[in-house]
Amino acid sequence: MTTPARVAGLRGRLPVKPPGERFALKYVHEYARAPLPAPSYPVDVTGGIPDDGWLMLANGPDPTCTTHPNGLGDCGFAGRVHYGMAKAACYGETETPESSDALVAEYLAYDNGQDIGVNLADVLLAWFKAGKIKAFAPVDHTDPAAVDSAMAEFKGLYVGVGLTSDANELFNQGKPWTVADGQQSEPDQGHCILKVKADGQSLDGYVTWGALQPATREWSAACLEEAWVAIMTEDEAAKVDMDALLADISALGGTSGPAPAPAPAPVDHKSLLEEFASVVRVVAASADRDISEVVAWLASHGL
């Protein structure tokens, strides 16, 4: 069996907001009911998904995407689907990932028809409002232990990175991303990926462009610019004070969508008919009344 060729895709993560504009959310460990367990290495939350089984999801050349087979910068949306795949695999659930066409349509609708990428914090809030995720919170991306602890607890970590100039070449060759030769995070190479592995010594593992990509721990330290957990249905048992977290998200102007309309009260058809008959009798018995009163009564009852 021939292993599919690795093909690097596109970017699409907009820069992190400046400090004064960032969401007033605490780190996820500060919402924990008890301290999150320290990472027990090696950490692996791929759930058994093969290294080449993660789907491109239109974030690069993708023949399954009929509308944009050459790809778009929808890495933020692809990252959410990859996150859901990891959680489902780890919890032993059957997951049917969103199709590339459907994900592209969702991404372009979010960006008003333009392929301009997303700010991760903003899109997480939008997904919360739409009910696609239960909650979200940042992780201190400068603390490797905190990053790996959150990754283990929430079965993945949604991260924003600045790729190096040789990222495509190394990905295509299946080689780890590294900064050993002086590579640097490029400010115009913002990308969203999912962290799913860490050995605690030399290598981390990320999902992007339909595959698992290794990276050195030094690369992670140099290139990670933000990290988030997204709490989904599978995480209901996570050790987080959801009331406190949801209160802080709501303070940002977020809600989990409009409250469902109350169920209509059951109709008492017998009483309704009796009331209607009474109106008809009153109108029929008086020369000063006309059919318009019957019509008005019907309208007032939605009939």
Image: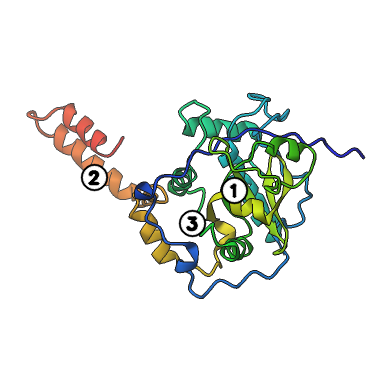
Residue 200 sits in which quadrant?
bottom right
Query: CA separation, marks 3 and 2?
Result: 59 Å
Query: CA separation, marks 1 and 2?
Result: 73 Å
Disc sitting over residue 275 in the figure: 2
Q: Quadrant of the C terminus?
A: top left
Q: Nearer the viewer, mark 3 or mark 1?
A: 1
Instruction: Say if 194 sits above or below 198 in the image.
Output: above
Residue 95 percent across, percent down from the top left: 68, 50
Query: Which residue type carries mark 2?
Result: Glu
Query: CA separation, marks 3 and 1?
Result: 17 Å
Rate crowding at label 3 as few (under 14), some (14 to 19) or many (20 or more) other CA atoms within 10 Å. many
> Residue at left 36%, top 55%?
250
Query: Which residue type carries mark 3?
Result: Pro
Residue 59 percent across, percent down from the top left: 64, 34
- First-in-chain label (3 vs 1): 3
Q: Residue lying furthest right in this view? A: 1
